[in-house]
Image: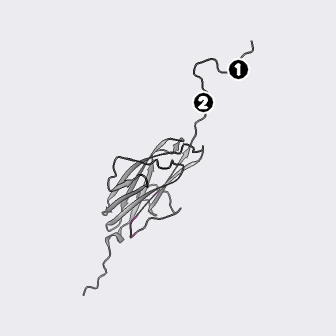
Amino acid sequence: TDQCDVVPLSENSVLKIHKIEDKKLVKPGEIMTYTLQGVNEGKGGATKVVSTDLPKSGLASGSMVLVGQPSKGSIDPKTGIWTVGDLKVGEKAEVKVTVKVADDAKADSTVVNAATIGNPSHPAPTGDQCKANATLTGDDDQCDVVEAKVVVPPVQPNNNGGGNVGLSSGL
């Protein structure tokens, strides 16, 4: 009889994710684009890979829209769940989505958004365990978080050319 242990390929996978935002400063109601990149840097293939985009604060509910198609799998913009599928060793996958900053976002508040990646052998982290990654290969927690600062432009006086604006001279 065979005395060897059979190890599923996905147990030798190393899943990493990186999230990139197109803006670091945003205005209330503005549209932002996020790019999610996933990779398997392990020594074995990864099966049933899933990534979840987790808006934490500052985004309008239900505003996610898919930009084009993911390079692999499919994403449900309503839930933020990207079903990547299987990733071979070294294989990368990418998806782009847009989101809307909440109309009532306050000046100097922060828009926070995170993404996780996992599969049955390597479950994605939960809660607030996520750390920011500078690069895709720098991920060490199967999660990435990005932030953008909300800026509110000053209110401009309304001068439609309908008269003088300013103080009268009292002449």
Image quadrant in which the C terminus is located? top right
Residue 27, given in percent of the width and then of the height, sits at: 53, 41
Residue 127, given in percent of the width and then of the height, sits at: 52, 63
Q: Which residue is mark 2?
A: 156
Name the image colouring: one colour
Label 2 sits on a secondary structure element that is: loop
Residue 117 forms part of the magenta stretch? yes
The number of discs equals 2
Residue 106, given in percent of the width and then of the height, sits at: 60, 44
Q: CA distance from mark 2 to mark 1?
A: 17 Å
Please name the amino acid that badge 2 sits on: Gln
Residue 89, given in percent of the width and then of the height, sits at: 31, 64
Q: From this viewpoint, which residue is outermost toward the right?
A: 170
Work out whether 123 lies above or below 62: below
Marks 2,1: beta carbons within 8 A = no
Residue 58: image tag: none
Please name the amino acid that badge 1 sits on: Leu
Q: From this viewpoint, which residue is outermost toward the top?
A: 171
Neighbour class for label 2 at 10 Å: few (<14), some, many (≥20)? few
Residue 167: image tag: 1
Q: From this viewpoint, which residue is outermost toward the left?
A: 1
Neighbour class for label 1 at 10 Å: few (<14), some, many (≥20)? few
Q: Nearer the viewer, residue 78 or 114?
A: 78
Residue 14 forms part of the magenta stretch? no
Mark 2 and mark 1 lie on one chain; the one further toward the N terminus is 2
Q: Which residues are magenta?
A: 115-121
Label 1 sits on a secondary structure element that is: loop
Q: Residue at x 62, y 17 (%)?
A: 163
Q: Nearer the viewer, residue 102 or 91?
A: 102
